[in-house]
């Protein structure tokens, strides 16, 4: 593939859904990209974007403040974990040890209570803390880029 400059297209089933994929050569390996079928693509111009909606400046400032407070200067992939995989591995480990695995009962259905999103954002901003970067002895803190 690398020498021809071509890619491969294929259809595969992943999580009970048929998917269109593209396979390409990258650094002596293969990379798989999921694509969309034609019926899954919408014309961007047909999507309502709220251009005629005017938000109060208080709401805009609240949103900006929340984004600023919850943002970090750089993406830190080590802060994220595949929790689904960790739970699955823990269940497998339980099963290997001969322990019984019990299905978790589903959470009760929520009532159809109308939520004031503005009040919820305000509360989030009050309680949110900026994620702290963990510096180690051999890794000094980086300065924020302008």
Image (tube, rainbow, N blue to C red):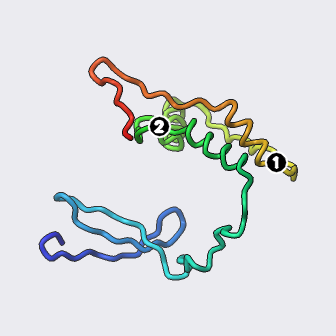
Depth check: 7 or 108 in front? Answer: 7
- Check disc 1 and report the residue beneath it: 116
Tag 1: Cα neighbours inside 10 Å, few (<14), some, or many (≥20)?
Answer: few
Relative to 62, say whether 19 is above or below.
Answer: below
Image quadrant in which you'd find residue 10: bottom left
Relative to 94, say whether 33 is above or below.
Answer: below
Q: Which mark is residue 72?
A: 2
Depth check: 4 or 72 in front? Answer: 72
Depth check: 134 or 39 in front? Answer: 134
Q: Which mark is residue 5?
A: none
Q: Is residue 118 left or right of residue 83?
A: right
Give how far across and how far down residue 105 sits, in percent. Answer: 74, 42
Q: Are marks 2 and 1 in contact (CB under 8 Å)?
A: no
Quadrant of image for the C terminus: top left
Relative to 110, say whether 123 is above or below.
Answer: above
Please identify the residue farthest to the top as the structure is shown: 137
Q: Of callouts 2 and 1, which one flags the residue occurring earlier in the amino acid sequence?
A: 2
The local secondary structure at tag 1 comes to loop
Relative to 62, say whether 142 is above or below.
Answer: above
The residue sitting at 55% across, 80% down in the picture is: 43
Depth check: 80 or 42 in front? Answer: 42
Quadrant of image for the N terminus: bottom left
Q: How far apart are the alpha carbons under marks 2 and 1?
A: 27 Å
Give how far across and how far down residue 96 sits, in percent. Answer: 48, 34
Q: Is residue 119 left or right of residue 18?
A: right
Image quadrant in which you'd find residue 74: top left
The residue sitting at 77% across, 48% down in the picture is: 117
The residue sitting at 34% across, 71% down in the picture is: 22
The local secondary structure at tag 2 comes to loop
The residue sitting at 74% across, 53% down in the picture is: 56
Give how far across and how far down residue 38 sits, in percent. Answer: 50, 82
Please identify the residue farthest to the front as the structure is shown: 57
């Amino acid at each position: 593939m690398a020498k021809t400059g071509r890619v491969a297209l294929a259809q595969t089933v992943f999580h009970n859904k048929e998917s269109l994929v593209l396979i390409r050569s990258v650094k002596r390996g293969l990379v798989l990209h999921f694509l969309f079928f034609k019926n899954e693509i919408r014309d961007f111009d047909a999507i309502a974007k709220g251009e005629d909606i005017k938000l109060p400046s208080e709401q805009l400032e609240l949103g900006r403040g929340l984004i600023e407070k919850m943002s970090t200067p750089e993406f830190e992939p080590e802060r994220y974990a595949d929790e689904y995989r960790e739970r699955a591995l823990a269940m497998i480990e339980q099963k290997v040890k001969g322990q019984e695995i019990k299905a978790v009962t589903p959470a009760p259905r929520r009532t159809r209570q109308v939520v004031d999103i503005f009040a919820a954002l305000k509360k989030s901003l009050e309680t949110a803390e900026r994620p702290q970067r963990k510096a180690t002895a051999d890794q000094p803190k980086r300065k924020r880029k302008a």
